[in-house]
Image (cartoon, grey):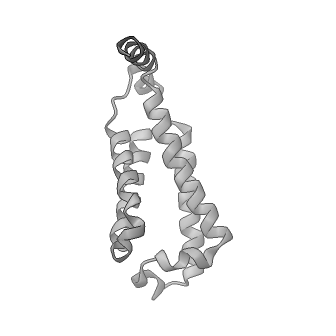
Amino acid sequence: MKEFIGRVNKLLDKYPRLSTIFLRMGLAVVFIYAALGSTLNPDDWIGYLPQFLTAVFPAETLLLLFSVVELALAVWLLSGVYVRYAALVSFLMLAGITLSNFALFDISFRDLGLMFAALALAFLPVSEEERESI
């Protein structure tokens, strides 16, 4: 067992950048799923919009705009460009979703995990190679 753990650790140490890639992909998939789901089945998602916004703007329009923002954020995360900023925007967006749906915390609690995954992505060290390409 000790030998197996040693091999696994050696393998994981060999690919340190994978953590960044996995976090970026995971967050992007969540935003893509939410954008597509809310576009294809808006009635299932309108209830999650903050009431103070739906009192001023049509809910369908807000949902469509939010879907566009989510898709743009997903593309930004997948692009690998300015990842720290994309991660911080993701964190803020997920925090806003969580806070505006606090009454639905039994459902939105998962967003806390995503929120902190985004924050972890923002705090991961950037290699010199990545720093120079920006």
> Residue, x 35% and y 61% (percent of image)?
95
Query: Quadrant of residue 82 in the image?
Result: top left
* Residue extending furthest toward the right: 40
Q: Position of residue 118 (x, y in %)?
A: 39, 47
> Residue, x 56% and y 73% (percent of image)?
63
> Residue, x 56% and y 49% (percent of image)?
29
Position above or below: 49 against 97: below
Q: Position of residue 43 (x, y in %)?
A: 61, 79
Q: Nearer the viewer, residue 110 or 62?
A: 110
Total numbered labels: 0
* Residue extending furthest toward the bottom: 55
Q: Nearer the viewer, residue 110 or 84?
A: 110
Q: Nearer the viewer, residue 58 or 131?
A: 58
Please state if 43 lies on the left or on the right of 8 as rendered. Answer: right
Q: Position of residue 114 (x, y in %)?
A: 40, 52
* Residue extending furthest toward the top: 3
Please state if 72 lies on the left or on the right of 126 as rendered. Answer: right
Q: Is residue 134 visible?
A: no
Q: Is residue 99 visible?
A: yes
Query: Quadrant of residue 42 in the image?
Result: bottom right
> Residue, x 42% and y 53% (percent of image)?
90
Q: Position of residue 36 (x, y in %)?
A: 64, 62
Q: Quadrant of the N terminus?
A: top left
